Image: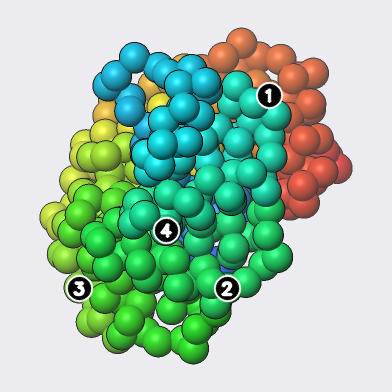
Amino acid sequence: MNFLHLTILFLFATILAACSTTEKTVVKEVPGVSKELPPENILTPTQQEIETVNTKKQVDIKNINDQELEVHKPAKTIESYQKEAAQGDSNAEYALGIKYRNGDSVAQDYAKAREWFQKSATQGHAVAQTMLGNMYRKGEGVDKDTNKAIEWYEKAAAQGEAGAQLNLGWMYRNGEGVAKDATKAVEWYQKAAVQGDPGAQYAVGMMYRKGLLGLPKDAAKAIEWYEKAAVQGDAGAQFILGGMYRNGEGVAKDAVKAVEWYQKSAEQGYPIAQTFLGHMYRKGEGSAKNAAKAADWYQKAALQGDPEAQFILGSMYQIGEGIPKDDAKAREWWQKAAAQGDPNAQSALAR
């Protein structure tokens, strides 16, 4: 057997070893509501960081923005809102708060945003109350004051405002501005989830899946809540569902459905879903083997900095699997992965 054949065999073994590391059990927690992976998956340190960022984007204290304005009506000018607000219209006051907070049609001014939210919230506008709570919590245009944030969230939540209910669930879970209280946290999360808030639905699904905050472990209920969030486009829930169907957790194993959910998440740009979709196409799991599609999804994830995808993509370039053989590109992707501490890429470069 010549040197080239030995090199190719070693490379295949290395790739398979890398893929197999994604199928070991791991329990991962991140601050707040974690975007943990299914039991057969393991994250690299960089993947963990990406997941933490995605968690904060999706489940951190909810911000309501222009989508809450009169989206089905013609857009109003800032002058129109000002005239209506001057007459005490709470919707116009809220709209001006949004405009000043986002710097939309006016210079961004948190102090003015808080002022308009306060006027609207005092009249009982539930979403303005939630936004005012957000500003007190974050110290936007006002000194940070979690007690006042809780006060305004509670006013909004009592009116059934799902964003405020989700926020209260988060704060009671983490003891922010209040004493930690698992019972109250679950109560508020469930209220928001029942109203259709996808972040709360994800959170409730995760609680049932892991048996958190006093809820019993119940994979079937977890699936139910994840699916509610997933059909609303929550990429994290779609990714988790992919893993649960792949592993048969709470449902019968179904690799085809796993691919479907991974695909939905991956198409939204969720990098780890892109990597796992690459695995599925590369192995022919839940779909026909398709090395070209696998390489395409690995590349999408690699471009977002996923080190596992970078290593595998480099290896596919090295042997010409699904893409033209290109030693220079192979080395380039291995270097990117190695720079993030990927041991397989470091080993490949050392040869």
- Nearer-N-terminus badge (1/2): 2
Q: Amino acid at mark 4?
A: Thr
Secondary structure found at label 3: loop
Using the numbered discs, state the Cα–Cα distance from disc 2 to disc 4 in whole angstroms: 18 Å
Depth-wise, is mark 2 or mark 4 nearer the camera? 4
Using the numbered discs, state the Cα–Cα distance from disc 1 to disc 4 in whole angstroms: 65 Å
Answer with left or right where residue 216 lies relative to residue 137: left
Dot 3 alpha-carbon crowd within 10 angstroms: few under 14, some 14 to 19, many 20 or more:
some
Query: Which disc, if any, is residue 146?
Result: 2
Answer with left or right where residue 20 lies relative to residue 306: left
Using the numbered discs, state the Cα–Cα distance from disc 1 to disc 2 in whole angstroms: 55 Å
Q: Amino acid at mark 2?
A: Thr
- Nearer-N-terminus badge (3/1): 3
Q: Is residue 101 above or below residue 343?
A: above
Depth-wise, is mark 3 or mark 4 nearer the camera? 4
Residue 124 appearing in the image = yes
Using the numbered discs, state the Cα–Cα distance from disc 3 to disc 1 in whole angstroms: 44 Å
Mark 3 and 4 residues: CB-CB less than 8 Å, in contact?
no
- Nearer-N-terminus badge (3/2): 2
Give residue 43's position: percent from left, percent from top: 56, 56
Q: Quadrant of the C terminus?
A: top right
Q: Amino acid at mark 1?
A: Gln
Q: Quadrant of the N terminus?
A: top right
The residue wearing badge 4 is: 122
The residue wearing badge 3 is: 218
The residue wearing badge 1 is: 318
Residue 245 appearing in the image = no
Using the numbered discs, state the Cα–Cα distance from disc 3 to disc 2 in whole angstroms: 33 Å
Q: Amino acid at mark 3?
A: Asp
Dot 2 alpha-carbon crowd within 10 angstroms: few under 14, some 14 to 19, many 20 or more:
many
Give residue 36's position: percent from left, percent from top: 45, 61
Dot 4 alpha-carbon crowd within 10 angstroms: few under 14, some 14 to 19, many 20 or more:
some
